[in-house]
Image: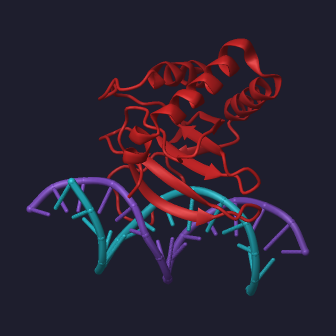
Chain colours: A red, B purple, C cyan
Amino acid sequence: MLKKASITMNKQEDISTKNYLLPNFTNGFPEFRESINTTKKKVMEGRNEEEEKNGSSVGKKKGEKKVKRPRFAFQTRSQVDILDDGYRWRKYGQKAVKNNKFPRSYYRCTHEGCNVKKQVQRLSKDEGIVVTTYEGIHTHPTEKNSDNFEQILSQMKIYARS
DNA sequence: CGCTTTTGACCCGCGC
DNA sequence: GCGCGGGTCAAAAGCG
């Protein structure tokens, strides 16, 4: 309901988020980078690998091909959950987590063959902190170039690459 | 009208 | 084996 409209209206917030994000990437927050390495290491170890579901009905879950699906998590200071990164996301689930009173939302990229998923969670401690976790790499170009968020995505792709 | 969101049910891995 | 926590499905509602 108040998703992209809010983002558009809260453009200022997005700018703040950007300014908050980019220095983390370039200058490097120790915790941040460590988190990235941890995530990447886990992915490299193959701890978490998922099968790509593709054109089959229910019931086929295990024993399929294992696709390395790099995950990347970062947190932003924003009052809006959804950050418009130029891709189109379809929400497919929402679940409440144990330690946080705010639910976690699950999104999936609406593109044929693009199995990128994203989950957004807001911390109950700080309402202004939103944790966004990307999973997978987009295999299609960005539709919009509305924001400089594309650069951030590029950074994320670089980190998630290998 | 075609799409996304909503929301409860289902499923799965894991710990007890 | 059962319950719990977390992730996904799918049917129906909602909205441009």
Measuring from the top left, give residue B10's x and y in whole percent.
50, 77
Rendered view: A141 above or below A112: above
**Which residue is located at x 55 percent, y 39 percent?**
A135
Rendered view: A150 above or below A94: above
Residue pushed farthest top?
Answer: A27
**Which residue is located at x 67 percent, y 17 percent?**
A23
Measuring from the top left, give residue A99's x and y in whole percent.
77, 62
Say left or right for C5 vs A122: right
Res. A68 image quadrant: top right
Residue A127 can be seen in this image: yes
Say left or right for A135 vs A140: right
Position of the N terminus of chain A, as image quadrant, is bottom left
Rendered view: A30 above or below B4: above
Res. A41 image quadrant: top right
Measuring from the top left, give residue A10's x and y in whole percent.
47, 39
Measuring from the top left, give residue A142's x and y in whole percent.
34, 26
Rendered view: B4 above or below A31: below
Position of the C terminus of chain A, as image quadrant, is top right
